[in-house]
């Protein structure tokens, strides 16, 4: 079985991972039919660097003025994003604790779209995402990754709700 868990910096996504480890990958052998080992892929999607103004990398520097950051600055921001993603996934990978075959993947783009795309590309059996418990109005303005994936992913989607004590924080 191939499973993807969407991971971000939230406690809810880490809870979804813990739920997955405890409930889907808790067997002593952890093998699928035919001796093939199950695979868990931890996916973190970070937003692309913002580009302002008319130029591909212009940003506002005052009234009617656009500045262009140096390539070094753009590279520094990208490297910083990758380091943050690597730290998030490292923390998540520790939760797997050699209980299953796990790999990590860092993508850039809109998390809703990228999780659905990579699920289809990898032909996974299950996509698992956490649920932050946004209300209707917040979901309408902010969007909900779990809601989007439930409607548009080509594979089954499991949305793991956090316990009530976590949701109330």
Image: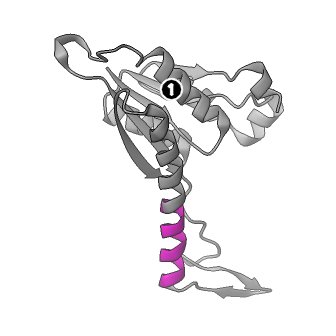
Count of numbered circles on the image: 1
Residue in the image at 47% along x and 23% along y: 21
Q: Secondary structure at mark 1?
A: strand
Residue in the image at 31% along x and 18% along y: 30
List x then y, in percent, for residue 161.
66, 21
Residue in the image at 76% along x and 87% along y: 64
Q: Is residue 132 a member of the stretch shown in magenta? A: no
Is 137 rendered above or below residue 60?
A: above
Quarter residue 57 falls in: bottom right
List x then y, in percent, for residue 116.
46, 34
Q: Which of these two is toward me, 41 or 45?
A: 41
List x then y, in percent, for residue 122.
31, 34
Q: Which of these two is toward me, 153 or 134?
A: 134
List x then y, in percent, for residue 123.
31, 28
Residue at the outermost left position: 34
Is 21 rendered above or below residue 66?
A: above
Residue at the outermost top position: 33
Q: Which of these two is toward me, 88 or 76?
A: 88
SS majority, magenta: helix
Q: Residues within 10 Å of mark 1 (few under 14, many from 20)?
A: many
Task: Point out the stretch of residues depicted in magenta.
Answer: 71-82
Image side of residue 142 versus residue 15, left or right: right
Q: Where, quadrant-wise, is the C terminus in this rendering?
A: top right
């Amino acid at each position: 079985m191939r499973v993807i868990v969407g991971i971000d910096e939230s406690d809810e996504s880490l809870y979804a991972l813990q739920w997955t480890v405890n409930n889907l990958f808790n067997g002593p052998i952890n093998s699928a039919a035919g001796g093939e080992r199950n695979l868990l892929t931890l996916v973190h999607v970070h937003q692309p660097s913002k580009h302002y103004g008319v130029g591909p990398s212009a940003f506002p520097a005052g009234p009617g003025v656009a500045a262009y950051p140096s390539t070094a600055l753009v590279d520094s921001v990208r490297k910083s994003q990758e380091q943050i993603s690597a730290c998030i996934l490292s923390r998540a990978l520790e939760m797997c604790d050699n209980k299953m075959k796990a790999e990590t993947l860092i993508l850039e783009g809109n998390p809703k779209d990228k999780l659905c795309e990579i699920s289809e590309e990898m032909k996974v059996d299950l996509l698992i995402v956490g649920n932050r418990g946004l209300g209707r109005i917040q979901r309408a303005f902010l969007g909900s990754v779990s809601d989007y994936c439930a409607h548009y992913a080509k594979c089954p989607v499991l949305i793991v709700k956090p316990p009530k004590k976590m949701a109330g924080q």
